[in-house]
Amino acid sequence: MEDWKRILAESVTKPQELADHLGVDPKEIEDVVKAYPMRITPTVLALIKERGDAIWKQVVPDPVELEDREAPDDPLGEEPDSPVPHLVHRYPDRVLLMVTNQCPIYCRFCTRKRLVGKPGFLKKGELDQAIAYLQAHPEVRDVILSGGDPLLLPDHLIERILKALRTIPHIELIRFGTRVPGALPQRITPALCEMLKKYHPIYMNLHFNHPDELTPEVREACGRLADAGVPLGAQTVLLKGVNDDPDTMKRLMHALLATRVKPYYLYQADLTKGTNHFRTSVETGMHIIQALQGHTSGMAVPHFVIDAPGGGGKIPILPNEYLLHLDETGAVLKNYENKTYHYPQPESSRTRELPMVGIPLTGGWCGHEPE
Ligand SMILES: *Cc1c(COP(=O)(O)O)cnc(C)c1O
């Protein structure tokens, strides 16, 4: 057996095993685990330092998950957007293909809590159906392999999917959405990297929520992917008690960049049933972005988005701070230090003459040109 399969099999999945390792009362979580599976890999288990810390909250089942009865199972409305099994086609030019229900760890805040952990992966006939759909839809240029976690499939099944997708000329990009490098770094084998290289351009968005997740072993796994030419992005979920403060988030973004991973999205937590105890206010995320923008490398600032309930897709949220006023004469802007600046419009878009009057200014402005 390959090393990573053996290590995955050593994960904590039963209440009694969790009791043995972390001293929780197994009865407290038995019903939760029946409703929503648990899996904690040895790598992630080793990161838990104390009850209720940022890693614990993400992976240890909590009875409050069962108290949440009102929220929807499928808040993003993925099922109505699914033309063939396992495929979600919401945006004009890109699709999600869910290739397995298995994950290395079962995040307690998972958006697809209704699905994950159930046995099953994309079967041969279902792959054929997805490929036939994509062949018939030349507008699709970007396929995102998701799940579950696509990197839990064995190499030969990943390769079967990649090979099939690469028979379709209009598919430009193939992306993976995965938590494997952070949760099961042993899975990122040289053989996997060699295989992926044959199907470029392959991109990966890695799921990380807390700076402690970037251990030396995890950094090496990310390095192997980067060395194989796979551009790495990060997706982070804003989670109460895990990363909902500017300092933790800044440390996470810096640790990601140091790992050659570019922060991509910061998600407002979804409404999914069983996960509402993780939600923060929308202002929390806006405040975090404001604390990053201008104060640290622009590379470290992800897009803050809300995946609109009911299937509206990802909608970017920017702090309302930066554009104070805009009209045909110009824009009044505020920078990260609360200083105000004016950017004039080009002559051609002006319908009335300067000087500007009646523009609300919150402070003095200076006419700096951009450098
Ligand atoms: C997130 C998502 C995508 C990809 O969106 P990008 O903004 O291109 O990263 C595609 N389809 C669905 C259904 C998604 O949720």
Image (cartoon, helix red, strand yellow):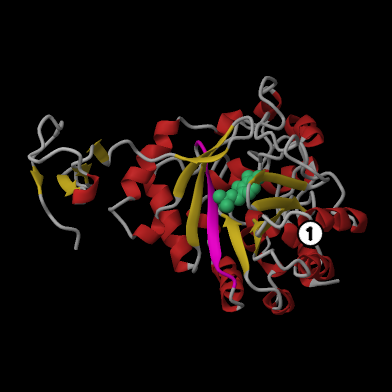
- In the rendered image, the vertical position of residue 9 relative to residue 337, given as above or below: below
Q: Which is more toward the observer, 179 or 32?
A: 179
Kindly identify the residue that appears in the image at 76 percent across and 63 percent down.
Answer: 7
Query: Tag 1: residue type?
Result: Gln
- Relative side of 119 to 306, left or right: right
Q: Quadrant of residue 157?
A: bottom right
Q: Is residue 21 visible?
A: yes
Kindly identify the residue that appears in the image at 69 percent across and 63 percent down.
Answer: 171
Kindly identify the residue that appears in the image at 42 percent across and 48 percent down.
Answer: 248
- Relative side of 7 to 282, left or right: right
Q: Which is more toward the observer, 107 or 17?
A: 107
The x and y percentages for residue 75 are: 66, 31
User: Which residues are drawn in magenta?
Assistant: 230-240
The quadrant in which the C terminus is found is bottom left
278 inside magenta stretch: no
Q: Which is more toward the observer, 294 or 213?
A: 294
The x and y percentages for residue 270 are: 59, 35
Q: Is residue 48 visible?
A: no
- Relative side of 352 to 148, left or right: left
The rendered magenta stretch, by its main secondary structure, is classed as strand
User: Which element is circle 1 on?
Assistant: helix
Judging by the rendered image, the residue that carries numbered circle 1 is 135
Kindly identify the residue that appears in the image at 76 percent across and 41 percent down.
Answer: 82
Q: Quadrant of residue 41?
A: bottom right
The x and y percentages for residue 362 are: 14, 33
